[in-house]
Image (cartoon, rainbow, N blue to C red):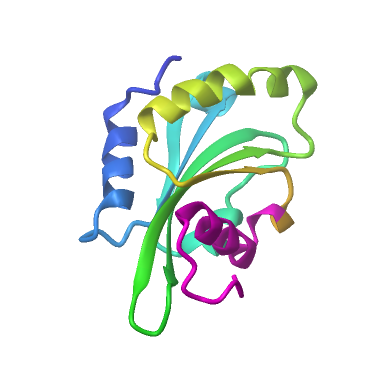
Amino acid sequence: MSGIDAPEIREAYDAVRSDKDETNWLLVSYTAATGNKVALTKTGTGGLSELAEEFDEGEVQYAYVRIEYANDKESTRVKFILVVWIGSKTKVMRKARVGVESGAIKKVLSHFSIQVDADRMADLDEGEIVKRLRKAGGADYNGGRG
């Protein structure tokens, strides 16, 4: 897939993963606006809520997000998620390419705990995502309260 190996995507990925960088999400798109190749669309430091504002209802987009949550009073965890956004107004033929594209995306944005498939803002509820991360992590020091 053209563009997925672009250095700016790798740099943004490394920034999101770094404990020393404030960047906590990146967004890549494959649209006519990017010359029909995968391109880094944007990065940010405002977490999942800031990222959610960037999704386009008529596009397929991919995001890599750093999520930090309290495990208990004494510790926090850092996990990464991959968001596959398929906007509700995305054309059918565009949706059909997601399977192939997401496979290529996962080769570059490879280290994540869960994949979140989203087509509406409610799918990006951070509380629900943290519950999924806790389940995926195996240890729940919060007594099953999510």
Quarter of the image with the N terminus is: top left
Q: Is residue 1 left or right of residue 11?
A: right
User: In x, y percent, where is residue 62?
Assistant: 53, 37
User: In x, y percent, where is residue 75?
Assistant: 34, 76
Measured along the vertical axis of the image, is residue 10 above or below residue 34?
below
Measured along the vertical axis of the image, is residue 48 above or below residue 107?
below
Quarter of the image with the C terminus is: bottom right
- Which range is magenta? 123-146
* Res. 130 image quadrant: bottom right
Q: Is residue 8 left or right of residue 46?
A: left
User: In x, y percent, where is residue 4?
Assistant: 39, 23
Q: Residue at x 66, y 34 (%)?
A: 59
Q: Residue at x 30, y 62 (%)?
A: 22
Residue 62 within the segment the image draws in magenta:
no
Q: Is residue 84 left or right of residue 94?
A: left
Report if residue 44 is visible in the image.
no
Q: Residue at x 42, y 43 (%)?
A: 112
User: In x, y percent, where is residue 119?
Assistant: 72, 43
